[in-house]
Amino acid sequence: MAESATVRHCRRGGASGVPASRRLAPRAPRPPLRSHGNGRRAGAAGPRRRGGVEMEPAREAEEPPGSPALPAEEPQGGQPAGASPGEEALPAAAGRERGVRGAGPQGPGGRAARGRGRRGGGESGRAGRRPRVTVDSSKAKTSLEALKISLRQLRWREFPLGRRLPCDIYWHGVSFHDNDIFSGQVNKFPGMTEMVRKITLSRAVRTMQDLFPLEYNFYPRSWILPEEFPLFVDEVRMLKDSDPSWKPTFIVKPDGGCQGDGIYLVKDPSDIRLTGAIPSRPAVVQEYICKPLLVDKLKFDIRLYVLLKSLEPLEIYIAKDGLSRFCTEPYQEPTLKNLHQVFMHLTNYSLNIHSGNFIHSDDANTGSKRTFSSILCRLSSRGADVKKLWSDIISLVIKTIIALTPELKVYYQSDIPAGKPGPTCFQILGFDILLMKNLKPMLLEVNANPSMRIEHEQELSPGVFENVPSPVDEEVKVAVIRDTLRLVDPQKKKRKDVQCQALEQGPEEPLPAGPAALPSLCLKQVFPKYAKQFNYLRLLDRVAVLFIRFVGVKGTTKLGPTGFRTFIRNCKLSNSNFSMASVDILYIDITRRWNSMGIDHKESGMCLQAFIEAFFCLAQKKYKSLPLHEQVASLIDFCEYHLAALDEKRLVCGRGVVERRSAVVPCQTDGPHLTPAAHSPLLNRTATAGKFADDRNHRYEQC
Ligand code: ADP
């Protein structure tokens, strides 16, 4: 997980939950302090002394280093039919755009803001001037500094203490629920934090792996502990038996952990720490990627910023530059001797900053945190196919978000039911990606609250720290926040109109204040741009729409037994072979199992993932001979057909009342699906189910 606003404690002591074997070694002497720019924030908090074991809260969760800009295009992962993406390559403009780096107070935006400040006037401006966009930053937490710089560049109006009247935008540091909001836009989606927890993300990706094993092979093989411990043991044994040369390593990551907390490596399932018969904390255990790409002999990962601008319709943007976070000890493939060496195996900034080898980056190309574009430049100069790499990354991002959207839609309708006042949402996500030696990107995790801090701590003397600006962070993060705001600007349309008028009126009329001096956007739209290539993967969005329809009248995320029965009846799924009594048994069996996993005890009933499992069972029953994704697609078609017919009948009968209560409308993916007979292979692809996908699919067959 990425950074959250959680207070963190020093790992240096012993109370951190980091296994003793992995506690940080005594710190080597730090390299001499370097000067960081003008140090304008250096003393902001002043040197602080930390005592004993406790460390000050809120070090960042993750960050990467990195540098130059990214070209990109043509996702190749999908190999779907249709649109060819990427006519244009992403300009390797990061460097140029980073010119705004000075941005903040010292950059062009800042200067412009000061220079023309007199026009900023009141919130609604003087006569004839457009009102300024208002932003409530009272809950921004650690992203405040970067947000302030962005707002100055945009010349928008900040309300650091909140505001009695509604604001256009609410910037939250942690979650959707930081504030009660009934209008405007908020930078968090309800449920996102829950969705990207390690276990939930693994489940969501795995469901997609069951459907599309080849397309979702960018996520390491994972098992959820404790409930899948026996499965983990069995599968590893089977794999070892079938391939004696396979000498795997596994990484155990506690659910809800961040910044490397509690993570450890093992060579054998029996090494997993057990309390009694089960692992002590819910966790994900994953196959460890043993052959990462190295730069300067060091392992590194990439933090990429992704903007989910809208859920319905789906709109995704990727930042052209990100950060690369480096380990601080030369990498060696895992052996029993080096498994515990965190500075060699874990790329977390928050861990490596404690290494004596950590180098604060003064520019984008060096140090322990660099821009991703600097890595790409380097790879490119070595002849690597950087365009393909970008394309694979875009694919990975889109597919991951497609795995998350079904459940996000359920959360959304629960928190912002249709017809009720509520804000619209957008969110910046932090994608952590590891490049394998062969340049294949692998998803490590998604962060709902990626660190947006633009300063780092330096230790002046043992135990005494001060905050100093981090140019690399500022360069990347301010651009991401500023350009996110530009993309969600509520006055964009109005401004266009006003600018046209102003131009028509001649040069005397002052142009409305706007971000005219800003560089081109650092965020690049990838969806719906490449929708045609990926829409075939969005089957579960349609299952979620069915689920939401039957969930009930009050804002909830769970389906009750009556709702499930109504679903079966309205979709005409019961028959002499599948009685309503069997329906009830199916509901009870699956719901009980999911609820026993202890995911969410707040509400009773069937969660979306359980419904999906039931749906897969029904699909397998009904369409035995097809591959799973075709079975599911066929059943969706069948259900949608009957529900549409039912709605029509009700309309004709004058009832006009349908169960549908959600603002979430069926997503348009592969066009209308109204003919149950038209289930002919919807998808022109033979997704050969992988061995384990087969095993897991067996789950659905059993019901
Ligand atoms: P956290 O949220 O605690 O940072 P991550 O999943 O990001 O947890 O893992 C922490 C670090 O461990 C990553 O930054 C990466 O360096 C390393 N790591 C995680 N998963 C793997 C994996 N499957 N293979 C290799 N390295 C991994």
Image (cartoon, rainbow, N blue to C red):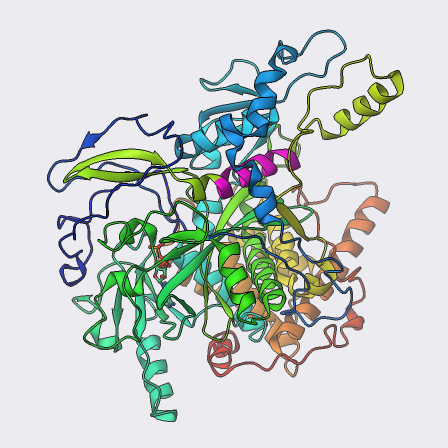
User: On the rendered structure, is 132 left or right of 694?
Assistant: right
Q: Front-most of 74 and 663?
A: 74
Residue 234 appears at what percent x and percent y?
33, 82
Q: Is 667 situated above or below 38? A: below
Residue 70 appears at what percent x and percent y?
59, 55
Q: Residue at x 40, y 49 (%)?
A: 63
Q: Residue at x 31, y 76 (%)?
A: 333
Is residue 484 one of those drawn in magenta? yes
Residue furthest to the right in view is 504
Find residue 240 and report its image quarter. bottom left
Q: Is residue 97 at all visible to an observer of this figure?
A: yes
Is residue 166 one of those drawn in magenta? no
Q: Is residue 134 at all visible to an observer of this figure?
A: no
Q: Is 301 situated above or below 703? A: above
Q: Front-most of 306 and 145?
A: 145
Q: Front-most of 644 and 62?
A: 62
Q: Is 472 situated above or below 688? A: above
Residue 638 appears at what percent x and percent y?
73, 66
User: Start and end of the magenta stretch?
Assistant: 475-487
Quarter for ligand 1?
Answer: bottom left
Magenta part, dominant SS: helix
Residue furthest to the left in view is 52
Q: Front-most of 60 and 417?
A: 60
Q: Residue at x 54, y 41 (%)?
A: 427
